[in-house]
Amino acid sequence: MTQEARAVIGRYAPSPSGPLHFGSLIAALASFCQARGQGGRWLLRIDDLDHPRVVAGAERAIRDTLADFGLVHDGPVLYQSERRVAYAEAVEHLKNTGFAFDCGCTRREARDGPVGLEGPVYPGTCRNGLPPGREARSVRLRVQRERIELLDHFQGRYGQDLAADIGDFVIRRADGITAYQLATVLDDQAQGVTDVIRGADLLSSTPRQIWIHRCLGWAPPTYGHIPVVVDADGEKLGKSTGALALDPAARQAQLIECLAMLGQMPPASLETRSVPGVLRWAVDNWEASRVPRRMDCRRLEMPGAG
């Protein structure tokens, strides 16, 4: 299929647990340019399913910030909190088809297995049925001893042996909330997303999401994981680390800084352009091949910040 015939759909899916910061802007801009640069649509999803983490007013602030920086989405906003029925139906389908099973283990018991990529691998206690006297707490997806690989737009080839590296993983938590891995797959499928562009801190989640697609009989989207922005101490620049807030008085400068960090080589002439002008240049000149695998973000200076 030619690029012209391929209906490209990208998305940005922030969680409303706080305001957007500079790292958020880089991720949003990259996904925007990847979609619009191919003549595609760019959607907005609010990942508000994990309601204990939702901060009042954050969703409105996120939408306002994106609009201030000219990142205007296509179509209606999708809210995860409105899709609980679809998630529940998918969990039951996966259980009925043998891909998923009830698990009665506590968090401590589930961590009794060998060390894997992100900590202990689930030991398989309930894989063949709940032991006597146990009640279901969570639901897990079965994995196979098979290497799941992807060719990432920015990070190159990446893969995992899910059985050895991760183990059977949770798709519905003990508190009844659908796990991120399943919800994001269902949402991307529902929205017809073709290109998932997000931070490299989520790269290790991607083989699990590809496996979910396979279990449901779906073709996964393509993926691109941009380098995570870190501060001078090498810590991820995020809400929990006191990241510098975005400055609405320096929107053009911050967009240009984002483009530079994404390897797009913005010309000095962009400094005199409006926000829409900067974005037009960004979309027209977007080259995914220029995005670095890693960012030397210790050089980061926030334009307009004191």
Image (spheres, rainbow, N blue to C red):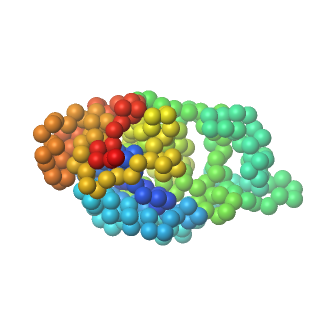
Q: Residue at x 31, y 36 (%)?
A: 261
Residue 217, position as x, y percentages in the image: 49, 50
Q: Residue at x 45, y 38 (%)?
A: 231
What quarter of the picture does the N terminus occupy? top left
Total marks in image: 0
Residue 98, position as x, y percentages in the image: 65, 52
Q: Residue at x 63, y 42 (%)?
A: 143
Given residues 140 and 278, the one toward you in this image is 278
- 152 vs 122, left or right, is left
| Residue 266 appears anywhere in the view | yes
Q: Determine whether 199 is above or below 160 in the image.
A: below
Given residues 58 and 185, the one toward you in this image is 58
- 76 vs 218, left or right, is left
Residue 125, position as x, y percentages in the image: 78, 46
- 205 vs 291, left or right, is right
Q: Residue at x 77, y 53 (%)?
A: 106
Residue 186, position as x, y percentages in the image: 48, 57
| Most distant residue in the right direction | 133
Given residues 17 and 167, the one toward you in this image is 17
| Residue 152 appears anywhere in the view | no
Given residues 219 and 224, the one toward you in this image is 224
**Residue 179, image quadrant:** bottom right
